[in-house]
Amino acid sequence: MPQTPSATSHTSASPEPLPVHKPPPELHTFTKAQIRDFLSSPVALPEWKPPTKAFTATDRQRLDALHIPNIFTIHDESYPEFNLWYPDLNLYALGHLEDLDPDFLDRFDDFVSGDSHIALVNTSGSGKTRLLFETVHRRWGLYFNSCYERISNPLGSYDWTSGIDRLKADLRIYVPVPRQENDKEYLPYLQRNEAAVSLEIGALLLSRLIILDYFVDLITELDIDECEAITRWALLQLRPKNCLDHDAFNGMTSRLTGFPQADITRWVKTLAEKHAEKLSFVAFDEAQRLASLYDRAFLDSDRTAHRPLLRPLLISAGSYLPHSRIIISGTSVDPAAMEEYIAVSASSVNGVRPFVALGEFRSDARIRAYLTHFLGDSISDEDISIVTRWMRGRHRFLTVFVEYVLVHGPTQFLRVMDAIMLATTGFKRPGGKTKGIRVDLGHIMDAEELDTSPLARQLRCAMYSLLTRDGPASITDQAAAFVGSGAAHFTDSVEKAVIDEPLVCLSLVKWISRSPVYSTHGILYRRLMDPQSSITDCALPEGLALTLWSRHCASGVQLDEIAQFPGKTPSWAMKPAKFALTSADTSGRNHRTITTLDSPLVRRASDASDVMDWFQSADSPFLVPDAGLGAQLVFVLHTLTGPRVVFVHLEPFSTKRPHRVPEIVPTSPGQFYKADDMRRTELTTALASFDRDGPPAGQQRKKSFRTVQLYAFAKFSTSQRGFHPPAAILSVEDMLRGQTVKELGPQSVARAFR
């Protein structure tokens, strides 16, 4: 052992030698040679070639001039003929997206502005990945794919996805939230999990930095200008196998995971300081996976709640690269959670900015320009209009459509659209043909998952808002969850999401129409079987309105066929009565019968003023009044004896307390708005105006109301005699037995997007 000098010795002790730090591992010789060849040669990504049988010689020449990259896609291992090199529009015009999207440059400048970290969040297919590709093509930085898949998502390196898989073997997947008495027992497991992630992230970043270090040396030696160098670095990260014939990033990362943490930390620090200007950002794509993965393996700072893999990832990345902006991109990314995680890292970058404005294919002009860019003038205006109607919305819908048209040829333009529609929504367009077109696409929404989803009730309400009320299908409660599900998308902020894409609506309508839980039939049946079953906040009034209109708009409603009147049935209830729009002016009340719609089917009132406006000038045949009125649906029928206002009570009991028997006494129309004297007076005045005859001249009499009230899920306590004004029991059981309940269908979507 080394001897310690005596305290009385006059000879000065020699200083301890500084530890000799070994350099980071070097790249393999063949990898260096391939990187040199890549930088010394023209960029030569494989290009897609238009099929000879699908395009004319002129069209093939035009498409060749576009230099569209290709990508190999295995559709079905049993059918090799369907395994083709497909056009890769994810990388097409990389660095020149403004040629296809005139608004892109402003959007890009907004995206990279500021100096905070970024939560890039929106629905699947909205253009997040392409924005990251453009960013790495225009700025120095690092890009990681959190969900690399050789067939469905083959862009980027496999390094981080491979690292995630390795963590599964290294982590204790469940770490209990510690109590005081077991804190010491479980704390080592948490620390080990965090250390495993830190080592994996360190190896991941170090791998990039080692390759970047050699890359920078070469661009200096070869005198490659800055813009060209950034482009080459982007391509190397996005298509490593095409650039080097192998994934050098993944290979190097696998090697580095065997090194000690201290060495990795030191090497990352050294190289990061050396190339600080090349590390303006580090982006993790498809990060919705990280926001839910291993979500019982980590804890928050207080160790009182579980956290997913995203937390230690951000802490590690922020600590290894404290001066770099971190971009987390995914369908389910919570900016507040990001800020919480990064705050406990060593990052010197402050704050997290959500970014959602990715643009859409919304206007006819933009969709037409995009289609003609690839297909020229070979498509008729009529066919383009059809595709514009159905494919508008998020980027993926139209780009995937164009990719398949390029494979099958412009003569199959509408067949491709019909095949995509059938595959993603389950609906076939009337007159549509799909023969000979194979598309490897799944349903946008999974019906079985939706039936058990906590979002299901709101999704049904949103669809009825859009398709029966022509209102926006806006989501403010749990907006992020709806975006993450793929049903909705953000437009301007993370506070509000909307559902307004035809293909998504078709998919949701398919689910609603067949759901045993959330179809109108299913809701009515469950309520009939179980009086405690909730029917609030599920758009049941709109569903009933759709049924009544669809079944009776042409021939009229014969009330005694849909309801049971106690005592003697009024004669006018035994004859068909047409739906009518009511209005009032100085000359009195007017009614216009209708059999077709040129306005929304339903108007939903937010307050009593909206109800009075509808009675003053109805623009929809059905009204869903505010809760204070006391009924859930209102409409006007023009009977043989004149107009009558129909009030439908879907929740006939005024309290939520259990009722021993389902018997009620009809409410007098003069008692609507029971808690609001002013509104009650206004409504009774409006209802009285439906009685054109009025009292004899010079006489006063009690107001007569030309109304009829229909009650569901109830019985009358005096069922042997009639009521005045008339009241009846809605025959819900007969409606269900006779299969007369009408559900939303593709025609509803077609009308909304005509």
Image: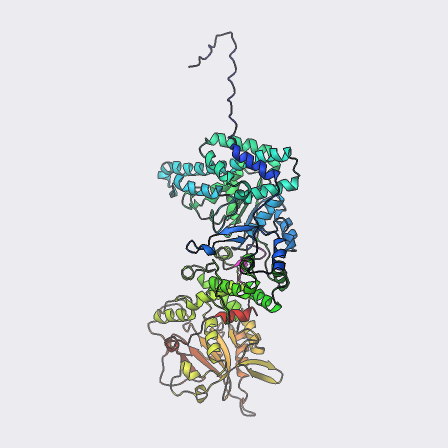
Q: Nearer the viewer, residue 133 or 405?
A: 405
Residue 446 placement: quadrant? bottom left
Q: Is residue 503 visible?
A: yes
Q: Image check: 27 left or right of 586?
A: left
- The percent position of residue 205, horizontal first and vertical second, equals 52, 37
Q: Is residue 210 visible?
A: no
Residue 498 highlighted magenta (yes or no): yes
Q: Residue furthest left?
A: 660
Q: Image check: 11 left or right of 520?
A: right
Q: Image check: 240 left or right of 99?
A: left
- The percent position of residue 95, horizontal first and vertical second, equals 63, 48
Q: Quadrant of the C terminus?
A: bottom right
- Whether 314 is drawn above or below 433: the answer is above
Q: Nearer the viewer, residue 572 or 659?
A: 572
Q: Which residues are magenta?
A: 488-499
Total marks in image: 0
Q: Nearer the viewer, residue 487 or 581?
A: 487
- The percent position of residue 394, horizontal first and vertical second, equals 55, 58
- Whether 268 is drawn above or below 357: the answer is above
Q: Residue at x 62, y 62 (%)?
A: 368
- The percent position of residue 412, horizontal first and vertical second, equals 54, 64
Q: Quadrant of the N terminus?
A: top left
Per the picture, the main secondary structure of the magenta-coloured stretch is: loop
